[in-house]
Image: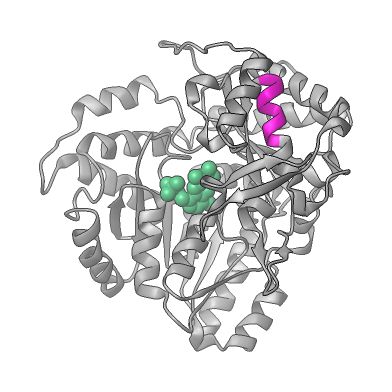
Amino acid sequence: MKTIIEPFRIKSVEPIRFNTAEQRAVLLRKAHYNPFYLHSDDVMIDLLTDSGTSAMSSDQWAGIMHGDESYAGSPSFFRFEKTIRDITGMPFIIPTHQGRAAEKILFSIMGGEGKYVLSNTLFDTTRGNIEFSGAVGIDLVCEEGKHPTVAAPFKGNMDTAALIKEIERVGAGNVSVVVMTVTNNSGGGQPVSMHNIREVSSICKANGIPFFIDACRFAENSYFIKKREAGYESKSVEEIAQEMFSYADGCTISAKKDAFANIGGFLAVHNEELAAKCRNLLIITEGFPTYGGLAGRDLEAIAIGLREVLEEDYLQYRIRSMEYLTEKLVAAGVPVMLPAGGHAVYLDAKQFMDHIPVNQYPGQVLACELYVQGGIRACEIGSLMFGKYDIDGKLIPAQLELVRLAIPRRVYTQSHIDYVAEVIIEVFANRHAQKGMRIIEEPPMMRHFTVKMEKIG
Ligand code: F0G
């Protein structure tokens, strides 16, 4: 088979500023060993997130000029609404400034003290909004999803037996919503099968519980279904996405991922009464219902991006890019999550830094070293992000210690990715020289964004 090439040409470029390992070591110390504090022009390859970092197409930029900025009834909104209705089959479309704003609105209505939200794995802002409302979020990812280096086709699936048990334990009336994250970002960007979505949906129906999809990466998930699930080989990605959404009562989406937009999100629902409640909150927090938290130009860019992301040449290239990097790392013996995820490659930091205990944050140590050695910015998804303390102040570690290399869409070329592999392999070879880290300052919630750390010893 020939190389799968990028299905686009480059029309506009941004310079990357090179710096040295010595300069980066100083910059990182000034950033308190937290890559979120780095200035992005000091980063050479920025894999912190695939969110809002996509390269927009020339059509999307043209859409930006077409955007109609009317306060009410903008044609840009109606194009946005029609596109989302076509894909999701949901009649009520509520634009927000990003995914977490949609979550905030949804869980302000559906969360609250005494309520439970069950999921395969909640993303951190989703969990944050649930907990902020007073509700409890519970992750029920399938067994395969808990073992980073064991390959399986749908490691994002929800454990349906555990779901039934949990509904019985807390009482169906107390489960305000079940949320399926596709692909399962915090669980390694792993897909969820249509079979699992259908099953979870029917368990929810039988118990009278609304079923929502956190659909930020719906197109990547749909493509995995096409490639991996029997019966979907000859369906179009759009048809698969439509079927996925057909099982849900609603969805929240960040348009900063699969919609290739730099900002934006939305909430889509079937229930008119719920939509009315959401719109009331939207008006006081985001904006009038035909723009929500967005400019007309953003609505255009999102509507166009949602169409482009369903193109199979693009998805083939996209998913292949993750496999390509994964294969290079596996060949060098680097412990990496298998199989490759949809939007990111996840290093298994527990195995990578096997000499550093979890309470010294091996994932953060690894993320920091990737920056010093190669100017690569990655993100810890482990005990720094998800760790909690017990009553004695002892760390309750996360299930997995991962470092995520999220690949922005349509931004980096194959030689950038070759360079990333070379740096990781070099850091792996010298890993035992690394020491653990401790926290010197942290906020009460979502600490990984603003935590300050230091090296031990
Ligand atoms: N849900 C999932 C699965 C996400 O990955 C994100 C964002 C959100 C919701 C929230 O969307 O950022 O538009 O408010 N994920 C980014 C990331 C930040 O880096 O994975 P948002």
In terms of depth relative to the viewer, which is nearer, 385 or 256?
385
Above or below for 440 versus 412 = below
Give the quadrant of the C terminus: top right
Residue 440 lies, in percent from the top left, at 62, 49
Residue 88 lies, in percent from the top left, at 41, 54
304 sits to left or right of 313: left
In the rendered image, which quarter is residue 340 located in? top right
Above or below for 356 versus 161 = above
Above or below for 282 versus 216 = below
Residue 193 lies, in percent from the top left, at 65, 56
Residue 89 lies, in percent from the top left, at 38, 57
The reply to whether the magenta stretch includes residue 369 is: yes
Q: What residue sits 47% from the left and 58% below the top?
A: 245
In terms of depth relative to the viewer, which is nearer, 346 or 215?
346
In the rendered image, which quarter is residue 102 located in? bottom left
In terms of depth relative to the viewer, which is nearer, 120 or 92?
120
188 sits to left or right of 277: right
Coloring scheme of the render?
A: one colour
Q: What residue sits 81% from the left and 54% below the top?
A: 147
Q: What residue sits 40% from the left and 43% below the top?
A: 255
User: What type of secondary structure mainly makes up the magenta span?
Assistant: helix
Q: Which residues are magenta?
A: 367-374
Give the quadrant of the N terminus: top right
* Residue 232 visible in rendering: no
